[in-house]
Image: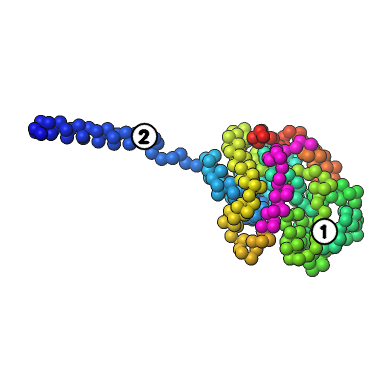
């Protein structure tokens, strides 16, 4: 090969290399777009009852919506105030608290139903065939506020029992201990929690679910009017991811429970059977043909009852309490 030909070959090779490098540096963005960080507030503490949310995180459903979720735990009455004032955007809370908040002028909106049945119940180690069996008995309740108290009042009202016919005591969250030691005859509980624990410990438990007597709105995802108006796609993404996690949990509870254990470190091998039973009982309250969708009649009945017993002074337009606009069509 002559010197001139060799120079031409070198030039061509260098030109091809430069072209290839140019193509590499110009293809696509240098970095992936950052995820949107969102705080999801949930009542209580890390718990097996939040399994569908943990599944949605672990399987990347929030990430697919461009979201990075951070959990914030607390009591739903306090968290709802933060959502109503715009200091938080999303909280998992109960429908009755939404009604209370709206009646006080807080612009909160329930955007996704989670618990299809109201989970509050009355449990006893003594036989209970009907609410009338509670007359003259000593009943413990965590506090004279919140969903437990409202559920208790709803049960009495539906059964035609005057509150004065039962001795109601505030016992905090000591229902299991108070029942086992005989400090109370019955206790207001969450049906998927204390009764399951007592059964696991070998006790025979009688349970009267409030949901058998009144169709009361229950737990779901709540946001505020500002977020809905300004960031509807954010709301839609949160709802879509949570519903996917819920469906997965219903379809394969064992796999969902394995994921839950990574987010609730308190679940060790000794407590795992109890917590798995709690999850199974919770599923009975979550299952529905139309996941996520609210029923206007239930909201109307719930608000009317709360007005009737004096928990709210005035009723608001039912359409302001909830929306199904972010629930995918079946």
| Label 1 CA crowd tier, 10 Å (few <14, some 14–19, many 20+) | some
Q: Which residue does the image show at 85% across and 63% down from the upper left? A: 126
Q: Where is residue 278 in the image (x, y as percent from the top left)?
A: 69, 56
Q: What element carries label 1?
A: strand
Q: Which of the image's four quarters has the C terminus?
A: top right
Q: How many marks?
A: 2
Task: Using the rendered view, name the quadrant where residue 205 is placed.
Answer: bottom right
- Earlier-in-chain disc, 1 versus 2: 2
Residue annotated with mark 1: 206
**Furthest residue toward front:** 1
Q: What element carries label 2?
A: loop
Q: How far apart are marks 1 and 2 (CA)?
A: 67 Å
Would you say residue 280 sits in the magenta stretch? yes
Region rendered in magenta: 276-297
Q: Where is residue 262 in the image (x, y as percent from the top left)?
A: 57, 56
Would you say residue 11 sits in the magenta stretch? no
Q: Position of residue 98 (x, y in %)?
A: 72, 42
Determine whether label 1 and label 2 are within 8 Å by CB: no
Q: Which residue does the image show at 54% across and 45% down from the upper left? A: 60
Q: Which residue does the image show at 73% across and 63% down from the upper left? A: 200
Of residue 109 and residue 265, the one placed in the foreground of this image is 265
Residue 110's tag is: none
* For residue 116, side relative to residue 232 (left or right): right
Residue 27's tag is: 2
* For residue 39, side relative to residue 3 (left or right): right
């Amino acid at each position: 090969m002559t010197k001139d030909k060799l120079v031409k070959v070198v030039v061509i090779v260098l030109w091809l290399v430069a072209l290839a490098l140019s193509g590499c540096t110009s293809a696509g963005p240098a970095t992936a777009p950052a995820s949107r960080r969102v705080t999801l507030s949930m009542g209580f503490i890390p718990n097996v009852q939040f399994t569908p949310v943990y599944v949605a995180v672990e399987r990347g459903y929030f990430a697919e919506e461009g979201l990075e979720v951070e959990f914030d735990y607390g009591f739903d009455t306090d968290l709802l105030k933060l959502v109503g004032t715009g200091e938080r955007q999303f909280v998992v809370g109960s429908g009755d608290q939404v009604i209370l908040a709206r009646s006080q002028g807080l612009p909160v909106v329930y955007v996704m139903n989670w618990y299809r049945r109201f989970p509050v119940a009355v449990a006893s180690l003594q036989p209970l065939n009907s609410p009338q069996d509670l007359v003259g008995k000593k009943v413990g309740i965590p506090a004279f506020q919140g969903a437990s108290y409202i559920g208790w009042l709803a049960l009495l009202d539906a059964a035609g029992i005057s509150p004065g016919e039962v001795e109601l005591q505030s016992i905090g969250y000591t229902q299991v201990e108070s029942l086992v030691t005989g400090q109370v005859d019955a206790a207001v509980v969450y049906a998927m929690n204390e009764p399951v624990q007592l059964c696991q410990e070998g006790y025979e438990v009688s349970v009267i679910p409030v949901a058998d007597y009144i169709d009361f709105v229950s737990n779901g995802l709540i946001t505020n009017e500002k977020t809905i108006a300004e960031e509807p796609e954010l709301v839609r993404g949160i709802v879509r991811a949570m519903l996917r996690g819920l469906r997965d949990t219903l379809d394969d509870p064992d796999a969902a429970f394995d994921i839950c254990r990574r987010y609730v470190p308190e679940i060790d091998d000794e407590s795992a059977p109890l917590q798995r039973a709690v999850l199974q009982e919770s599923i009975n309250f979550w299952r529905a043909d139309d996941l996520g969708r609210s029923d206007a009649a239930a909201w109307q009945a719930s608000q009317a009852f709360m007005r009737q017993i004096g928990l709210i002074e005035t009723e608001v337009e039912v359409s302001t309490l909830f929306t199904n606009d972010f629930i995918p069509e079946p």
